[in-house]
Each structure stands twice: as C-alpha cells, then as structure tokens.
Image: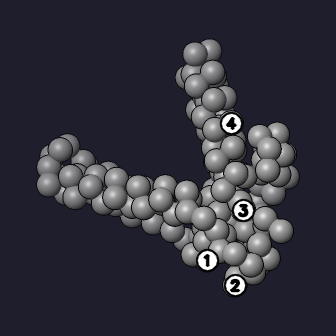
Amino acid sequence: MTFTESIATCFSKFVVFSGRARRSEFWWFALFLAVVDIALSFVSDGLSSLWNLATLLPYAAVAWRRLHDIDRTGLWTIVPLIPAIIMIVGMVADNPFGPVFWIGAVGFAALSILNIVFWASKGTVGPNQYGEDPVT
C-alpha cells in the first residue's frame, strides 16, 4: 500500500474498527499524522491540538484493525490508558512524582512499547478470526 492509498483508506474507514489493516497502511498513516502535526505545531499549538483531536478516531481505528491483522484484540490499543490513569491519580492524590506516579509511568511505557511491537509484527497469513488477509 502506498503513502497516498494509506491516507485515503484510513480516512475512508475512520470509524471502521472491524477487519484488518496491513503494516504499511498503519505506518504510512502514522507518519502522515506526525508530519502534519509537526508542521502545524510550528504555526500554532492550537491548530496542532485541533489536528490531533480530529484525527484521533481514524488513528484509533487503523491501530485497532492493525492488531486484528496479527490476530489480537483491538483492546490492546487502549490498555496503556490504564497505567496513564494511575499516573494522573498518583500526581493528584500523591505527590507529583511519588511512587504511584512512577508505577503508572513504567506501566504506560511498557505497554506502549508492547503496542509498537505488535503494530510492527507481521500479520497472520491467510484469514483469521477478524477477516481475510489484507495482503491478498
């Protein structure tokens, strides 16, 4: 899948959480989002924030479908939010950089790295429980 095909596919399937997404579809779209975000941040932090908010759903959908391609549930996409919430609670309830914060930070980092490994993994060859192989 090419860069432009990836962008078109991800925006046309911006609320489609079923099916599978190739590695190229996910990574080209992630690159596009990052480049536009960096460019907008030079113009205005507000525009950058608006861009991130507007593209959150399409990014979540392609990340979800990417996990389906390796025969994993898309819920792995949101698992790092659990320790992120623990971090926030630790900052509010405990001191800003107390032990609760660091437990959440380590958990968030570990689960985020795990997601990156999942997204970079080769997809299941042939059909799986989430649909047909997107390569064929």
Query: In the rendering, which numbered label is found on residue 129?
Result: 2
- How far apart marks 4 and 2 lie (CA) works out to 29 Å
Q: Is residue 46 left or right of residue 55?
A: left
Q: Could you tell me which quadrant the C terminus lies in?
A: bottom right
Identify residue type, mark 2.
Gln
Q: Earlier in the sequence, mark 3 or mark 4?
A: 3
Identify residue type, mark 1.
Asp
Element assignment for label 4: helix
Query: In the rendering, which numbered label is found on residue 21?
Result: 3
Identify residue type, mark 3.
Ala
Residue matched to label 1 = 71
Q: Residue at x 61, y 77 (%)?
A: 71
- How far apart marks 1 and 2 lie (CA) works out to 7 Å
Q: Is residue 115 left or right of residue 101?
A: right
Residue matched to label 4 = 32
Where's residue 16, x and y in %?
77, 64
Q: Earlier in the sequence, mark 3 or mark 2?
A: 3
Q: Earlier in the sequence, mark 3 or mark 1?
A: 3
Q: Earlier in the sequence, mark 4 or mark 2?
A: 4
Q: Earlier in the sequence, mark 1 or mark 2?
A: 1
User: Which of the 4 image quarters holds residue 74?
Assistant: bottom right
- Residue 68 in sight from this viewpoint: no
